[in-house]
Image (cartoon, helix red, strand yellow):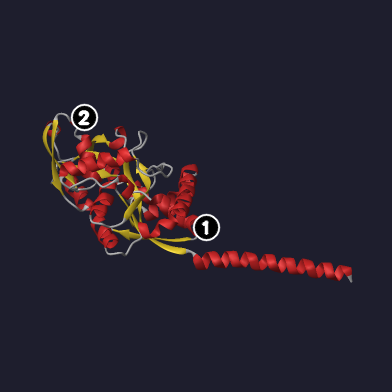
Amino acid sequence: MERIQNFGNKRQIGLVLLFSMLFIFWGGAVWAETFRMGILQVIDTLPLQVGVAEGYFKAENIDLELVPFTSAMERNTAMQSGQLDGFFGDMPATLLLAKNKIPIRFLTISYATDKKQRMFGLMLSPELPLEREKGRIRVAISKASIIEYLLDHIKELSQTHEMELEEVEIKRMSLRLQMLLMGEIDAALLPEPLATLAEHRGARPVVTDQSLEMPLTVLNMHINKRHLAESFIKAYARSVKALNKKPDHYRGLMLKTCRIPGDLAGDFPMYRYPEPRIPTESEVKQVQDWMLKKGLLLEPIPYQDLIL
């Protein structure tokens, strides 16, 4: 009789444990909160792709939906119209949205300049004669963006002192590359992998972002989702750690999601990514000072209004 009673008790305990596990599992699935993150399909966003693929965000009860856009303008419009909960972009874009009273906050830096790997390169057209590398050089950029911000810093480097870099706005990145290769523009400031693709097709690199020390891209969050910030960063940190530990494991994912051209697929490098952190007050001030000088901002935005 005692043996039967013990068996019954164990069976009850087993059932309680089973239902507890099912509750945790199904509760997590039911209560996972959707977060729509607007992205551009560039290599800076690979940690987000890893986090989704590995289930790191799901483990934090976040149903992360990565919404791809072909241009920053389309992404910004979606953010302004309330279609997104956050976005991948650059600091000038974040500040412009904040200027327009969109309650956006810095979540983390997604990429910063690194001496060991090129993310941006000032490339000269293969059609530009060597004797024309000094003097007036027409450079294709997108204005009011990290590209223009970088170019102004590049103008101060010794490699460009004999060049008179004249900005020409060409919004579409693919068109910039095409015009560069055809000689319709003297130079272009291009991100990877387009800089490497241009070099493979004869363009000549002048200078890169590697000697600069600054954040380049960031992840942002609408203030309405601030309750997810800690969980989001925990999942993102796991993604960065996994990617930096076994980069080649994610090569296929990079080729699929980050628009690596086919002729670069075999040897394009796997990048290392920084651990998550918000931009410092001095880093934000540096960008704001530049935007004030350019007339993109009329007054500084308090740092406390930009962080969670």
Name the residue: 18% across, 43% down. 292
Name the residue: 46% across, 52% down. 230
Q: Which residue is the site of mark 2?
A: 159
Is tag 1's residue or tag 2's residue first in the polypeptide sequence?
Answer: 1
Q: Please state which amino acid type lies under the numbered disc 1.
A: Ala
Q: Nearer the viewer, mark 1 or mark 2?
A: 1
Instruction: List x then y, in percent, for residue 149.
Output: 22, 42
Name the residue: 30% across, 32% down. 211
The answer to whether residue 175 is left or right of residue 113 is left
Element assignment for label 1: helix
Element assignment for label 2: helix
Measure how far apart labels 1 and 2 are at the Cα level: 48 Å
Residue 217 to residue 60: above or below: above
The answer to whether residue 267 is left or right of residue 176 is right
The answer to whether residue 301 is left or right of residue 33 is left
Front in this rendered view, residue 186 or 209: 209
Q: Please state which amino acid type lies under the numbered disc 2.
A: Gln
Q: Which residue is the site of mark 1?
A: 59
Q: Quadrant of residue 166?
A: top left
Front in this rendered view, residue 308 or 257: 308
